[in-house]
Image (cartoon, rainbow, N blue to C red):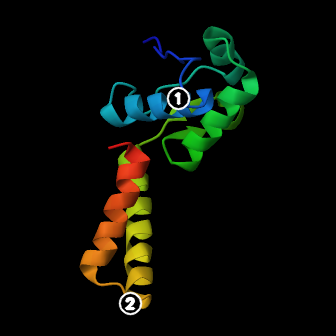
Amino acid sequence: MTLKIVVDADSGVAPFEQLRARISELARSGTLPVGYRLPTVRGLAEDLGLAANTVAKAYRALESDGVVETRGRHGTFVAAVGGAAEREVALAARAYAERAKRLGLTRDEARAALDDALRVTYDI
């Protein structure tokens, strides 16, 4: 399997974020199966015409998100993402709900604030 990623230099989105988002999308959709070994940082940087630091930053973000796992000298692999990502989001949602309640927001107000944040984040 060949990793097919295109980074648009004219996009307003930073190259590392384009790379992070695309690999995350491919992993979550199952196009990149669990255990798939990603190219080395240098190899992918060369293939995409990016700086190695840009690819390394994307890989670090993906690891932080639980999408990939680095196994030292053995490489970077697609992780079983569903469980870890969903747990982290559930914890963040609960913390948000508890904070909104402590601040005195109604359920509808808290939901409206969250909907606004989602619209901004997802460009809806």
Q: Say what amino acid the circle numbered 1 marks.
A: Gln
Residue depicted at 74% across the width and 20% down the height? 51
Farthest residue to the left: give it.
108
Q: Residue 79, percent across and down? A: 47, 40
* Left or right: residue 36 compared with residue 46: left
Q: Residue 19, percent across and down? A: 54, 27
Is residue 79 depicted above or below 3 in this figure?
A: below
Is residue 43 depicted above or below 64 in this figure?
A: above
Residue depicted at 61% across the width and 34% down the height? 58
Q: Helix or strand or loop: what does disc 1 sit on?
A: helix
Question: Quarter of the image holding residue 32?
Answer: top left
Residue placed most toward the observer, 124 or 51: 124
Q: Say what amino acid the circle numbered 2 marks.
A: Gly
Question: Quarter of the image holding residue 101?
Answer: bottom left
Q: Residue 5, percent across and down? A: 48, 17
| Front label number (1 vs 2) | 2
Kindly identify which residue carries mark 2.
Answer: 104
Residue depicted at 43% across the width and 90% down the height? 102
* Left or right: residue 121 compared with residue 53: left
Disc nearer the start of the sequence (1/2): 1
- Mark 2, other Cα within 10 Å: few <14 / some 14–19 / many ≥20: few
Labels 1 and 2 touching (C-beta < 8 A)? no
Quarter of the figure that contains the C terminus: top left
Is residue 106 depicted above or below 34 in this figure?
A: below
Is residue 34 depicted above or below 98 in this figure?
A: above
Q: Residue 2, percent across and down? A: 46, 11
Residue 4, visible in the rendered structure: yes
Residue depicted at 61% across the width and 35% down the height? 59
Kindly identify which residue carries mark 1.
Answer: 18
Residue placed most toward the observer, 23 or 36: 23
